[in-house]
């Protein structure tokens, strides 16, 4: 591998480290987000997750770890990834438009006290803005996991964690770390003492 490639790889690693550092600078908000996720499950409510593109993968990852397991065996917890049902997405997109693909599902699945966790590197997806509006109409709580300057979603969440930077890949890497921290908090609360990995 030539020196130019090594320099580029080193830059990628530095940029990723800077994104994670911006997460550490918001450790109070991270703690608040962990408490919100845990308390949602403690109250018997559910989490609905959403995002576009790579952020859709993060949304699916968070939900499947809640329903399945993260590190240790525990009770299954109610979480639904609004990006996962291709028939719902294509039906709603076809009949109502792409901007409504999450909002329509929230209208049908969301209840007061549930939590919407929305992932976005730009904060500008119109379907995510509509999702937040639909969640508010259902009296749900809203956790926004954002990038850059938060975009049009900035100021619309109960808790917002925004990763600084301009590269979507680096932002998503920090989002994944944050998601794993939130899931760790869930395990710390719901895994029985002495539970098996």
Image (cartoon, rainbow, N blue to C red):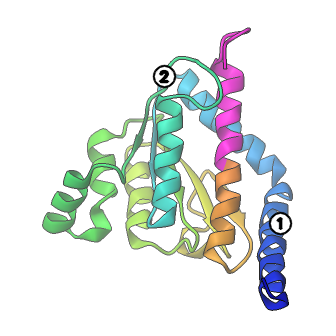
In the rendered structure, which segment of residues is drawn in magenta? 179-197
Residue 75 inside the magenta-drawn segment: no
For label 2, the SS is loop
Count of numbered labels shown in the rendering: 2
Q: Is residue 196 above or below residue 155?
A: above
Picture coordinates of residue 103, whole percent (x, y):
33, 56
Which residue is under mark 2? 76
Picture coordinates of residue 28, whole percent (x, y):
82, 48
Which residue is under mark 1? 17
Residue 111 position by quadrant? top left
| Residue 161 seen in the current view | no
Picture coordinates of residue 102, whole percent (x, y):
34, 56
Residue 184 inside the magenta-drawn segment: yes
Q: Is residue 8 above or below residue 97?
A: below
The 10 Å Cα crowd at callout 2, few under 14, some 14 to 19, many 20 or more, is few
- For the stretch drawn in magenta, the main secondary structure is helix
Q: CA distance from mark 1 to mark 2?
A: 33 Å
Closest to the observer: 125 or 59?
59
Q: Which mark is residue 101?
A: none
- The earlier-in-sequence mark between 1 and 2 is 1
């Amino acid at each position: 591998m030539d020196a130019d490639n090594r320099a580029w790889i080193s830059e990628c690693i530095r940029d990723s480290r800077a994104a994670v550092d911006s997460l550490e600078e918001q450790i109070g908000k991270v703690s608040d987000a962990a408490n919100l996720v845990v308390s949602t499950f403690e109250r018997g409510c559910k989490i609905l997750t959403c995002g576009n593109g790579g952020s859709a993968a993060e949304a699916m990852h968070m939900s499947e770890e809640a329903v399945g397991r993260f590190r240790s065996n525990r009770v299954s917890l109610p979480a639904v990834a609004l990006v996962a049902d291709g028939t719902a997405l294509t039906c709603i997109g076809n009949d109502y438009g792409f901007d409504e693909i999450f909002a329509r599902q929230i209208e049908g699945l969301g209840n007061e006290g549930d939590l919407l966790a929305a992932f976005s590197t730009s904060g500008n997806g119109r379907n995510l803005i509509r999702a937040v509006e639909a969640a508010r109409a259902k009296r749900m709580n809203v956790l926004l996991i954002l990038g850059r300057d938060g975009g049009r979603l900035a100021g619309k969440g109960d808790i917002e964690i925004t990763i600084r930077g301009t590269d979507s890949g680096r932002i998503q890497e920090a989002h994944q770390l944050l998601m794993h921290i939130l899931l760790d908090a869930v395990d710390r609360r719901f895994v029985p003492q002495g539970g098996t990995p």
